[in-house]
Amino acid sequence: MSHRFVASTGAAAAVIVTVMLAPGPAAGQAPSAASTAVAAADPSAPLRTPWGDPDLQGVWSTATATPFERPPELAGRDVLTEEEAAALEKRAVETATDEARPADRGRDVSGAYNDFWWDRGTRVIPTRRTSLVIDPPDGRVPALTPAAQQRQAERAEARRARTTEADTWADRSLWERCITRGVPNVMLPGPYNNNYQILQTPGHVVILAEMIHDARIIPLDGRPHLAQNIRQWMGDSRGRWEGNTLVVDTANFTDKTSYRGSGANLHLVERFTRVNAETLNYEVTVGDPTAFTRSWTVALPATRSKEAIFEYACHEGNYGMVGILSGARQQEKATEDPGTQR
């Protein structure tokens, strides 16, 4: 049984999953009878929508035991042996059990999410690659440019200069504030809620992420990107078909949604390819010449989920934010008056 968790990251408590969202494809979104018949006769034949586009619809999970970047001990190696892959999966399963946790882990706030709530992947990707990063060849995210390193240093210094890391709500991350995980972060595996749903119409593709309920509405009609002065949390996406692959070009990010050090010049090219009824290959190339010394690419197969997307009721139960800010005020009082009880 898999468990999907609803929470504000960094908050001290969980929010309970409530109701299902988007329980299934709307009328007209199922594959046509002819497409289904072709797929039954030839499993390798691409599924088609009633209007003829490749059918990417469904709920997809990106949970995996394959590490995002290649571990240092596997430097120079692209692929695991079958024995190594089996051992990695065995460790992932063992880690995902309550018995594998220290008995006192759940007593500390930093370990408040016990393993019942985690939904980490326990299987490596079928290619047995040693990392999800496939380019550069070393399987590692490229170094930041000197300018990006300077930006990070300045932000770190600004944090150190504050009385606490929670002077105001604006000091907390967009994730903790239930705003967004951003792109491509929302498409990549994390500790839980590794699911998204794709829905299609003749002129648009919608990608609904389970984590923080982000919805990307992607037009396919060839319209240009928005003007450069219009910046958005999730960027501005434009899609097109290249054979059976959906290619999504996303730009116009705000510099408030930094991904691994990126800025407003972040540019993504995503590729979605339905391999078969149960597998959707996802690939994203990340570029920002002001942040990274070179562009880089991540690839992973998403597997079809039989479960529906669940509501990520973040704000409704985000009392962790109140606790964080209240705790910071108490710390300030204690600093001003050492006799104040904490």
Image (cartoon, rainbow, N blue to C red):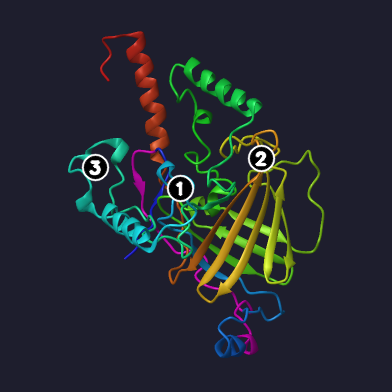
Nearer the observer: mark 1 or 2; the answer is 2
Upstream in sequence: badge 2 or badge 3: 3
| Nearest-to-viewer mark from 1 and 3 | 3
Is residue 15 highlighted in magenta? Answer: yes
- Residue receiving disc 1: 314
Q: Earlier in the sequence, mark 1 or mark 2?
A: 2
For the image, the number of numbered tags is 3
Which comes sooner in the sequence, label 1 or label 3? 3
Residue in the foreground of this view, choosing between 21 and 224: 224
In the image, what residue type sits under mark 3? Answer: Gly
Q: Report the predominant secondary structure element of the magenta stretch.
A: loop
Q: How much space separates mark 1 and mark 3, taking CA atoms?
A: 22 Å
Q: Left or right: where does residue 216 sit relative to residue 230?
A: left
Disc 2 on helix, strand or loop? loop
> Which residues are drawn in magenta?
11-35
State the image coordinates of residue 257 (x, y, percent, origin top left): 60, 38
Q: In the picture, residue 47 is in which quadrant?
A: bottom right
- At 34% across and 52% down in the image, what residue appears? 118
Three-letter amino acid code at disc 2?
Answer: Arg
The residue where tag 2 is placed is: 294
